[in-house]
Amino acid sequence: MILSVLEQSSLSEGISATEAISNTASLSKELDRLGYKRIWLSEHHNLNILQGSTPEVLLAAIGAQTTRIRLGSGGVMLPNHSAYHIAENFRTLEALYPGRVDCGIGRASGGDSYSRSLLMPTPDAWGDFPDQADQLAGYFHDTCKRAFATPLIPSAPPIWLLSAGSNAASGNLAAEKGMGFAVALFINPHASAEAVGQYRQNFRPSKEFPVPRVIIAVNAVIAATPGKLQEQKKISDFLRLMRDSGRYPSFVPAPESIEGVHFGAKEEDYLASISNREVVGLPSEAKKQILERAKHYDADEVLLTMITHKLSDKIESYRLLAEAFSS
Amino acid sequence: MRRHDLKLSVLDVGIIRSNQSASDAFSSMISLARHAETHGYHRYWLGEHHNVAAVVASQTAVFAAAVGAQTSRIRIGGCVLLPHYSPLVIAEQMSTLEACYPGRVDLGLGRSSGADRITSKLLREDRKEGLASQSYAQSVQRLLAMLRPGGVSLQVNSHDYTLRATSNSTSAPALWVLSTSSHSAELAAELGLPYAFGYHILGDGMKGAINLYRSKFKPSALCPEPRVLISAIVVLGETSEEAELLSIPQLLGMCAFRSGEPVSPQLLVEQAVTVTVPQRYVPLVEMFKKTWIIGSPRQAADEIERLVTLLEIDEIMINPVAASYTPDAPSRATNRERTLTLLAEVFPPNTAAREFETRADGARTKLHSTYLPIES
């Protein structure tokens, strides 16, 4: 099984944004060593708890500190930007780190409506998206004769379409345009395996993707001991409950800060109903769940995302998982 | 005895040569940045151009992030042509860069397009929020506000709304206004920001613009006193004859560029000397040679001293454009590096003064949080 990681540069209680960003760089170096295939970074705006706003800039820094791991966006929210601008950013990355760059695109906003209005929003985020995706691919392949995106390079970063999997539209679009398809179960636990099936069935090969490729993205809670696992899971559950009730906190709490928090039956039921979003367990159990989930969705690869209070816990979890998969 | 208080910096517009891939060009730029750092240069700034085949540097923040990881002390950043972008995107990019390399980031704001009309439209997608209605000065102010570590409070539909490009950050990038006109000089003075004049683009009006900036300067917490640097194109050789030779390829490229002709990657010296210079280029070459500093180390040093004395400045930013010889490694820009080496020998870095300056830059950026620009 191919394993990759999605990083959001979360801000933990008591640390600065500077540390949140440098934590992502430190983690990337570990993942590079541990053999993970990709590090993808997300784009969020004006959201205190997730400090990653501009994947391309941080990827450029990370690329210089790693040797083999693929560098990607998970994703660039295309409706916020000019496709030409994004093409220049990714061609810069591809020229710096040839053959290591993935361009993941999504059509959400990554922020609230006001911060979106401050970006360069397309009038119709959903309706304009296929055109924008075409433009981006056009700049990558120099098919737009009106203007070229510099630097001019012979290779194009593969484009992955990111989807919450709530309907078939994104999968169909990815299939039609010969893109990779990444389904975010950690956002939408109810994403259907049928969307993936349709994508595979309707897929039209492209230069970067001769065959369809599917990634599923899940939240991961992994620890060495049951006690540690309990502690990590509580933070993860707390954040999800707060997020889904519109009270997303501005930072990741320390375990001791939520000692007094207890979930009621309603909350536990809700968490159980969305458990498909994640894999939870000691390393061998997490491995089992990852393999099952990948099989169910017919995925080639699993992208893990993890929020811990301490960077060292996250590094340890990814190390344990890599070990479980190599044994 | 040469001046020892003069600070040298680098402007790299990202030249690509006829025998280089884009990846080679980037490698040679990173090598140039490291070379500059080793030789005591203060800043390594990038230029921004779009849809120009002779230039690989289009997105300053992205490339600067790679440079920062491969250097340790030199200040990084450079030109961002703000009219192309949402101020929020630039605030986020630059805050991320600052978080990666605290206290080392400069953001130079320019208002030209660095591109042809069609490319500019593509960058802005014809829909930049209020581009038509929002003036450049408003964009700069908005960006300044967004860069504040604590964020900015805005009134939206009569509700208070806090916007953060980045929160809980410990420092902010240092802002500079890039300029070739009195208009931007007044803006820099009004906002109390440091001022960089692009002598590499335009010589006319430089002294007047700098005087205007100084006379109208309003001190800010960010910049208590007027601060000026200029950028200049410099080509050095061991002798003036060699320097002349090394300047020919870039002169040919710039003549094509100014004539609205397609610009190819920079020719190698051996290729350029076989080119017959078209008659229409002759007046352009004469014009360029008025501002380009081409010569032996002594000649260049004399001209640099003349400029810094005339303008009463203590920093000059060198835009090294020397071409390469055929055997030079594609992953290096040996002759551009040599320009920096030779100049640093003439103006040896005053290490103590420079250390102090680096710290002062840091202190200034930290004061940023107490500096509240106007936000409407």
Image: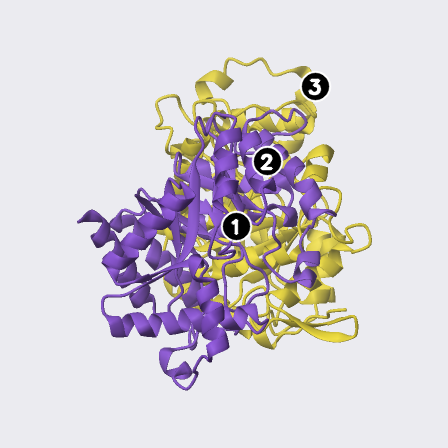
Chain colours: A purple, B yellow
Binning the other alpha carbons within 10 Å of mark 2 as few (below 14), some (14 to 19) or many (20 upward) gives many
Residue underneath mark 2: A136
Residue underneath mark 3: B280
Q: Is residue B55 left or right of residue B212?
A: left
**Residue A241: horizontal and vertical position, in percent?**
50, 71
Amino acid type of the residue tagged 3 in the rendering: Arg
> For the point 68% across and 50% down, which residue is it?
A120
> For the point 70% across and 39% down, which residue is it?
B120
Binning the other alpha carbons within 10 Å of mark 1 as few (below 14), some (14 to 19) or many (20 upward) gives many
Amino acid type of the residue tagged 2 in the rendering: Leu
Q: Which of B117 and B280 is in front in this view?
A: B117
The disc numbered 3 marks a residue on which chain?
B
Q: In this view, does A279 lie to the left or right of B189?
A: left
The answer to whether B294 is drawn above or below residue B359 in the figure is above
**Residue A39: horizontal and vertical position, in percent?**
39, 49
| Quadrant of the image occupied by residue A25 | bottom left
